[in-house]
Image (cartoon, rainbow, N blue to C red):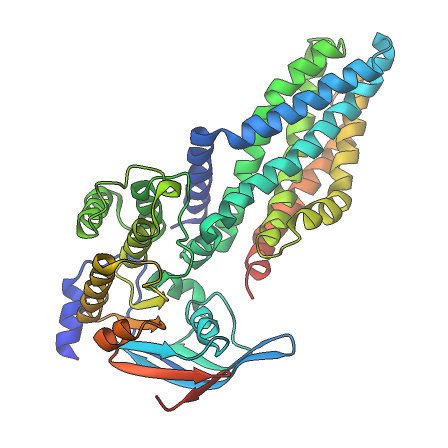
């Protein structure tokens, strides 16, 4: 089986399970919405301050709910030792990684689809091109975050301290993507165009590429003994 | 040997399965940090034979199965599947292995049939034969009465039936069984014995770890006894 077809098979499996249980979307969705609503109640003073706070709230929601999604996605592989079944199969190791990363990315993107309009309402962001630009920045940042997270969550399948691996190792590692995402979002909401934040977008793109390629190459060695 | 080859050709085979007539280990050593789990194991497993690996807890039985299942790399020694080096050629060889382990390795939220379809696709069962092939397996393992339910609702015996069906669905050359009779009732154990006999007849290389003396008596063509990571005379 070719790598794209094999990755799609792994993704399709995760999608089927998620459509049946709704577990990742419901838990991460509620968590992200809760953070957004609570922070809006706490920090909203006026429209100007709200716009300054919104980027931080958005990326904190994504960061924390992302960890939940990653943990849950790989917990499914721990149940019944299903990950071993995947690793025993003839699927190329990079395909297993890419399929899992794609699943996490898709679930987080769906959550963000709900999160962005809510953020716009609660923080009085304009429903114009800026929100579209924020959506693009968010998707780019999420792709890198999901790629890095899939790699570290996969490592966590074989160790007992999986939450520790995710929170202690993952956050410092993905901080360039999170920082670039926050800054680019702040600038765009402050009136900058996508062209003006292109350097930050390049950082996000480079991070995406680095973790997608690096993750695909490292997944095999990291899951072997 | 010719009869064996005919048997192999006659049986349903799928694209990913590579033929090899034997598996041989020489001086196999596996270390976990300072702990020596296997200390120079020599073994030879042949097509059409069932080899039972015996020994007390901590003897290295599961470690040997891990090496044979290509999940773990030997620290030293040689492991060959026919003419192929097990670790170097592991990507090619994985499709030729069938494994039944302690855990069922099935997705709890998918039904038994969905799990089998998923793994059949992974192992390259062609799309036009997939449904029929899986349905035949379901009937063979008497699973069609329950296999539409999610596997998290199954009893141990039902799980083991689907797991065994998953292990052999691609007609593997090497079938590895780790304590396959654990938790099975008399009927399910009989079905397990029939399946292993059928795999042996087909010409598969079967390696089984078990403490079940009855199963050993019924199935073992050869025995390999391990103690503290070394082979003993059985």
Q: Is residue B138 above or below residue B45?
A: above
**Image location (x, y in percent) of residue B155:** 34, 47
* Image quarter in which the C terminus of chain A is found: bottom right
Front position in the image: A110 or A138? A110
Compared across the picture, whether A59 is left or right of B160 comes to right
Tell me where residue A218 appears, x and y as whole percent.
60, 56
Q: Give above or below for B28 relative to B106.
A: below
Relative depth, front residue between A209 and A59: A59
For the question of whether residue B49 can be seen, the reply is no
**Farthest residue, direction front:** B186
x 17%, y 62%: residue: B11
Count of number-bearing discs: 0
Instruction: Tell me the residue at 36%/38% (across/down).
Output: B150
Figure quadrant of residue B149: top left
Q: Up-down: is B44 above or below B122?
A: below
Q: Residue furthest bottom?
A: B233
Q: Is residue B89 left or right of residue B123?
A: right
Q: Position of residue A88 (x, y in %)?
A: 43, 59
In-image side of B12 versus A9 (left or right): left
- Residue placed at 39% from the left, 54% from the top? B104
**Above/below status of B28 relative to B105:** below
Q: Is residue B96 visible?
A: yes
Q: Nearer the viewer, residue B100 or A70?
A: B100
- Residue B111 placement (x, y as % from top left): 34, 39
The quadrant holding residue A146 is: top right
């Amino acid at each position: 089986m070719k790598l794209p077809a094999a990755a799609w098979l792994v993704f399709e499996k995760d999608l089927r399970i998620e459509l049946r249980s709704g577990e990742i979307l419901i838990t991460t969705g509620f968590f992200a919405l809760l953070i957004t609503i609570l922070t809006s109640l706490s920090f909203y003073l006026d429209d100007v301050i709200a716009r300054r706070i919104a980027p931080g709230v958005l990326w904190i929601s994504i960061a924390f709910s992302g960890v939940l999604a990653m943990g849950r996605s790989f917990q499914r592989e721990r149940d019944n030792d299903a990950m071993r079944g995947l690793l025993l199969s003839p699927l190329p190791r990079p395909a297993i990684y890419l399929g899992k990363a794609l699943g996490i990315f898709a679930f987080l993107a769906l959550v963000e689809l709900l999160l962005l309009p809510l953020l716009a309402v609660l923080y009085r962001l304009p429903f114009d091109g800026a929100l579209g630009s924020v959506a693009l920045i968010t998707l780019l940042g999420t792709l890198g975050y999901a790629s890095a997270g899939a790699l570290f969550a996969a490592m966590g399948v074989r160790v007992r301290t999986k939450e520790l691996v995710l929170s202690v190792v993952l956050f410092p590692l993905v901080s360039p993507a999170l920082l670039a995402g926050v800054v680019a979002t702040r600038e765009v909401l402050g009136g900058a165009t996508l062209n003006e934040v292109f350097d930050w977008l390049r950082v996000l793109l480079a991070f995406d590429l680095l973790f997608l390629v690096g993750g695909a190459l490292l997944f095999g060695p990291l899951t072997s003994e | 040997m010719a009869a064996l080859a005919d048997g192999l050709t006659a049986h349903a085979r799928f694209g990913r399965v590579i033929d090899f007539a034997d598996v041989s280990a020489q001086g196999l050593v596996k270390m976990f940090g300072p702990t020596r789990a296997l200390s120079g194991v020599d073994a030879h497993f042949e097509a059409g034979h069932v080899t039972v690996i015996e020994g007390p807890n901590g003897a290295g039985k599961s470690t040997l199965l891990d090496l044979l299942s290509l999940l773990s790399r030997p620290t030293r020694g040689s492991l060959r599947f026919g003419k192929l080096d097990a670790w170097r050629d592991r990507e090619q060889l994985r499709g030729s292995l069938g494994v039944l382990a302690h855990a069922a390795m099935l997705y709890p939220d998918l039904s038994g049939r969905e799990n089998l379809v998923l793994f059949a696709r992974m192992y390259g069962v062609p799309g036009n034969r997939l449904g029929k092939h899986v349905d035949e397996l379901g009937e063979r393992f008497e699973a069609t009465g329950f296999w539409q339910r999610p596997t998290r609702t199954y009893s141990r015996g039902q799980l083991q039936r689907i797991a065994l069906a998953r292990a052999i669905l691609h007609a593997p050359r090497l079938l590895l069984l780790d304590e396959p009779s654990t938790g099975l009732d008399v009927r399910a154990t009989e079905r397990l014995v029939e399946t292993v006999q059928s795999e042996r007849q087909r010409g598969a290389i079967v390696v089984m770890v078990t403490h079940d003396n009855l199963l050993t008596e019924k199935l073992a063509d050869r025995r390999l006894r391990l103690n503290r990571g070394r082979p003993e005379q059985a």
